[in-house]
Amino acid sequence: MPPGATKPGQTSQTLPSGRVIVPAKQRAAQASTLSEDGGAQAGVPAPRSKRARPDVSSFWQEGHRPELRNVAPSEAHVDFPAHDREFNRAEAGITRVLSDAKHKTIGRMADAVANALKSGVKPSEIAFRRDPNLHQAILGEIQKTYDFGRKQAIAEHARLMQRAGKVTKFADYATGFMLADPAARKPPKSLIVTADVAAEDFENRLADAARNVANDLRAKYADDFASMDAGELADQTFGAIDDYAEGFIARAAMEASRKAMGAGRKDGFDEVGDEAADAGAVFERTEMVDSPNICDNCEPLDGEQGPTYSSVDEDVCEGGALCRKIITEVFA
Ligand SMILES: [Zn+2]
């Protein structure tokens, strides 16, 4: 399945809110926008969310992304530019980790393919060694995003309470939240799984590509590898896998950073949950970038409110988690 494609057999679903989500039909323009680079193309104009955002955010400054300048009244306590920065940092960090790993991994795989072909091992039976450091490198990046999201959620809660004139025991977070809570936390299980999935998916995709290349080479040379140089075979294999691997690294980086941000924010809201419930707060889904990144399924949910975090956390994104959805605490 190409990145950005709608899953085969995906049908309409009715959300807990009663809204019915119909998977978008083929839209060539959007499909290409969401495929290779997640839609971060220069020159793509026009916010897509139709929700009114009449207020200028107090967190927005000259130099921040123009799409983040305006907010809905319910979003006034949310620092969107800071989230934007963290998303960008995390995506760049994970992209760097995977790009660094790519060369080493493909080199290892190309050698394994060349040796297998020379010794008559079937491509489907070629075993590839895993990179033991990849998981930890990805986890290092998304742990920062998780911590950021968790602290931001608590800070937002504190600001919301203060603006409503309510007492909060999390007041320290409202301003200096980066200084507060200095204790490093062990990564939660969900984050370890996210890093595992990202590392495994990366290596599995390259391994599949390597086996396909091996099959192509068997056809091309009619299985006559006896006279061929192993180094030459490895070079041909390397080039073919490398061509294939371009595309999916950026997407993997976006998916992992979004999951980490969501996990951190959810855990932060869990910590302030009792106080929020006592104050009568609810949760609201917001597409923070309000940009062309929003897919057709997420766009109508922008601004949806529900009694709990998970009630507005439906995973309907047809962009494979490319939309920068976050869930905020608000007063209905
Ligand atoms: Zn979406």
Image: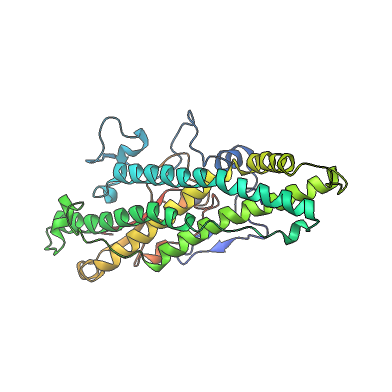
For the question of whether residue 43 can be seen, the reply is yes
Q: Taking 79 as reference, is 291 left or right?
A: right
Query: Residue 37 at what x, y percent from top left?
Result: 53, 39
Q: Taking 77 as reference, is 313 left or right?
A: right
For the question of whether residue 303 can be seen, the reply is no
Query: Residue 249 at what x, y percent from top left?
Result: 54, 45
Indicate the quadrant where residue 290 lies: top left
- Residue pictured at 27% horizontal, 49% vertical: 78
Query: Residue 266 at what x, y percent from top left?
Result: 34, 63
Indicate the quadrant where residue 32 lies: top right
Query: Residue 120 at what x, y percent from top left?
Result: 81, 56
Question: Looking at this rendering, what residue extends furthest in the top direction?
Answer: 43
Vertical comparison of 217 with 283: above or below? above
Indicate the quadrant where residue 285 lies: bottom left
Q: Taking 32 as reference, is 195 left or right?
A: left
Vertical comparison of 270 with 155: above or below? below
* Quadrant of image for the C terminus: bottom left
- Residue pictured at 43% horizontal, 39% vertical: 291
- Residue pictured at 46% horizontal, 47% vertical: 97
Q: Taking 202 as reference, is 140 left or right?
A: left
- Residue pictured at 40% horizontal, 56% vertical: 260
